[in-house]
Amino acid sequence: MVKKRSIDEINEKIRNGRAVVLTAEQVAAMGKEMTPAEIFSRVDVVTTATFGAMCSSGVFINFGHTTPPIRMEKILLNNVPAYGGIAAVDAYLGATETAMSGDQYGGAHVIEELISGKDVILEASAKGTDCYPRTEVKTLINKDTINEMIMFNPRNAYQNYNAAVNSTHKIKYTYMGTLLPSFGNANFSTSGELSPLLNDPEMRSIGIGTRILFGGATGYVAWHGTQFNTGKPVNEHGIPLGNSATLALIGDAKQMDARFIKAAYFEKYGVSMFVGIAIPIPV
């Protein structure tokens, strides 16, 4: 007989403090000794998580208006360019954007510093218009002085991903790390049995509006991520054998914790950002 449990029933158990919530690692261990039906009778929610380097990440920032006002066109944050072609005092800062002075510091570092509550130097220039007459501004900002800081990441939490090797006779420096010559190493990036989309390969419980833990704060699945592809071959368990589904995520970066958003530099490649993501899966 097929056993069923509704989301409403699980939420009611959570509200009453009766829900059993285990990590994917714990449930995987149970699977060595119990049948799926036995696990179902004991577990209500499985928590999954990942904390990998996710280049396709960044923040929208609204700086607030100056007096007199300016329509920011060229924008630097700690000497890192931000995209200003949105509106007067809005910008998007990409995690992989690098500083004008070198490639070892970039958008991810600025984002981590803002989340940490540190001051950042804002420099902006404009041609000046009748309604926005100011042509330049230079000031310090932090997360308490700006209006909004919204993290929106177009492609996070890859369902699966290729390993990287180097068949040549020279060291290669890549976003997958340093690859030694002649297949001297193999680099991969996954949280394995904890990985959210490996634990829900058909995305039955993860979709638009799913509430998640994002950088240590509440976030949401906004849309399917870029490069989303569910047409890859799968194994006998339904797990894709290549890079497949992705998620576009959104959350209030002002509420995030810098322990779960970490800037990184990959030698001779550039800047990236490690992003902490946790997603509950109802059983």
Image (cartoon, rainbow, N blue to C red):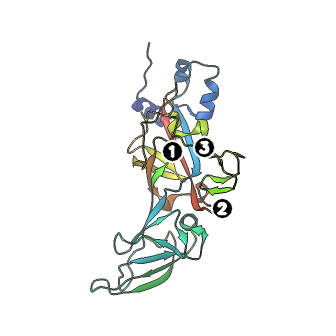
Q: Is residue 226 above or below residue 108?
A: above
Name the one closer to the observer, 258 or 81: 81
Residue 204: x and y, percent? 42, 33
Question: Dots 3 and 1: beta carbons under 8 Å?
Answer: no
Residue drawn at point x = 42 percent, y = 73 percent: 63
Residue 173: x and y, percent? 64, 58
Q: Crowdedness of circle 2 by 10 Å Cα count: few (<14), some, many (20+)?
A: some
Task: Tell me the distance, in whole angstroms, between the alpha carbons under discs 1 and 2.
Answer: 23 Å
Name the one closer to the observer, 178 or 132: 178
Mark sitting earlier along the chain (2/3) = 3
- State which quadrant residue 186 falls in: top right
Residue drawn at point x = 52 percent, y = 26 percent: 237
> In the shown orientation, is residue 133 left or right of residue 256?
left
Task: Tell me the distance, in whole angstroms, between the alpha carbons under discs 3 and 1.
Answer: 13 Å
Residue 23: x and y, percent? 59, 35
Residue drawn at point x = 39 percent, y = 49 percent: 222
Q: Crowdedness of circle 3 by 10 Å Cα count: few (<14), some, many (20+)?
A: few
Residue drawn at point x = 53 percent, y = 66 percent: 107
- State which quadrant residue 72 falls in: bottom left
Q: Nearer the viewer, mark 3 or mark 1?
A: 3
Q: Which residue is mark 2?
A: 267
Q: Amino acid at mark 1?
A: Tyr
Mark sitting earlier along the chain (1/2) = 1
Mark sitting earlier along the chain (3/1) = 1
Q: Nearer the viewer, mark 1 or mark 2?
A: 2
Q: Amino acid at mark 2?
A: Glu
Residue 11 badge: none
Residue 262: x and y, percent? 60, 58
Residue furthest top in the image = 1
Q: Which residue is mark 1?
A: 158
Residue 163 badge: 3
Q: Amino acid at mark 3?
A: Ala
